[in-house]
Image (cartoon, rainbow, N blue to C red):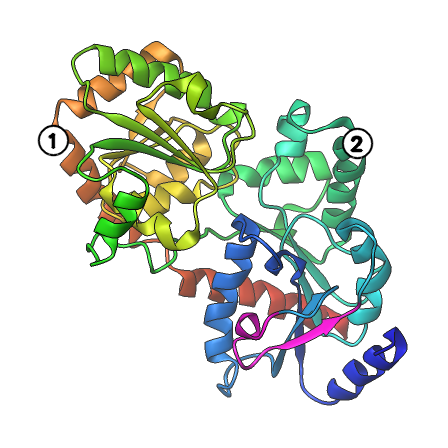
Amino acid sequence: MSEERHLARAADAAAGGRALGILAQRLHGRVTGVARYIGNLLDVWAAQLARPAFPFTRIVLLSREPLAGDVLRGTLENRWLPSSLPDAAWEQVYVPRLARDLDVLFCPSYTAPLRRPCPMVVATLDMLQVTRPADFPRAARLLRGPLYRLSAQRADAIVTLAEATVPAIVEHYGVDRNRVHAIPLAADPRFTAVAEASDAETMARYHLEAVPFVLFVGKLTARRHIPELVAGFGRAVERGFPSRQLVLAGPDSLGLGAAAVGARVHVLGHVPDADLPTLYRRAELVAYLSEDEGFGLPIVEAMRSGTAVLTLDRPVLREVAGAAAYYLTEATPDAIAEALVELFGSAERRDSLAAAGLARAAHFDWHHTAAQTLDVLVRAAGSRS
């Protein structure tokens, strides 16, 4: 089908009703954090779409390739236009055409079309481009930095994930505080402390059966203090805990490799979503020592799984974990080793943190997140008139 015929068909289908559009290119390929964010929102909204009280009659996912049927959840629409352009360029060239008759467009990953086709809400998930520019290649800094800022400035509203991030958005992007809305994430309902029959098979696949282990989940980067965690873990093991293992689950952008970290450290690389709930609930402890985080979803996943959390004392992470985590002021190898020795040696302390975490996790719910996000979108759609 030609581009013009495809656009004409989309326009014909748009007759009547209020339409919510969502940039959904991230739903292609390997599932990432942004894809989980979109997917969990869609799980809630798709189930509510047919209700008379739902403020939109249609949800339209915009992409440059057709989305799979299961992504559309049986009730959602998909508009697409193929292109060989990179995602950022495709978004600027084609999305204004795809979205021109929508009542509002939700852009869930930092950027939005600069040529506004309709009211827009953009999600600024963190401020890493501002706080840690050296973590990005020069070409990415030159492109993304201005694009992130202009997208926020041109959007009718900005969604972020924590109140602690709001001041940086207001200061560095020069936007009105009233346009920025902090809406926390939640753990997928699959994360639970209740064991499943498949747990033993999953643990055996990773050669972790009957082994007490510390778990990290996320991309292995310097800002998450992975080298310090590995070093601190090694020192804790030497102080009388030889049976412990450290499991690093996520893309190895540091190039650690098993040989570089020793036999007691398992570098798993990307772990399928289906296996993560088992790893979380079978871990003795989850360590998440991340700087400049936008939210810290692994903390909520760990708490919901009934597992104690070791993290850094930073405003965003405090906002997530409350009193339900063991906090470090600094992520030095010695400080990490001291914390691990204390937690390894006290099942009572771990159990207390795990119980507090389960109670804390109940404050985060995808229905609440979806409802608050929908409210922002409805108000933005009202600006169209």
Real-space Cα separation, disc 1 to disc 2, in angstroms: 48 Å
For the record, the magenta segment spans 68-81
**Farthest residue in the left direction?**
348
What's the residue type where badge 1 is placed? Ala
Name the side, left or right, on which 334 lies relative to 170. Answer: left
What's the residue type where badge 2 is placed? Ala
133 versus 44 height, above or below? above
Disc 1 on helix, strand or loop? Answer: helix
Name the side, left or right, on which 136 lies relative to 76. Answer: right
Q: Position of residue 353 (x, y in %)?
A: 20, 36
Name which residue lies at 57% across and 79% down: 55
Check disc 1 and report the residue beneath it: 347
Dividing the image into 4 quarters, which one contains the C terminus? bottom right
Name the side, left or right, on which 64 lies relative to 363. Answer: right
Name which residue lies at 37% across and 12% down: 333
Check disc 2 and report the residue beneath it: 139
Give residue 3's quadrant in the image: bottom right
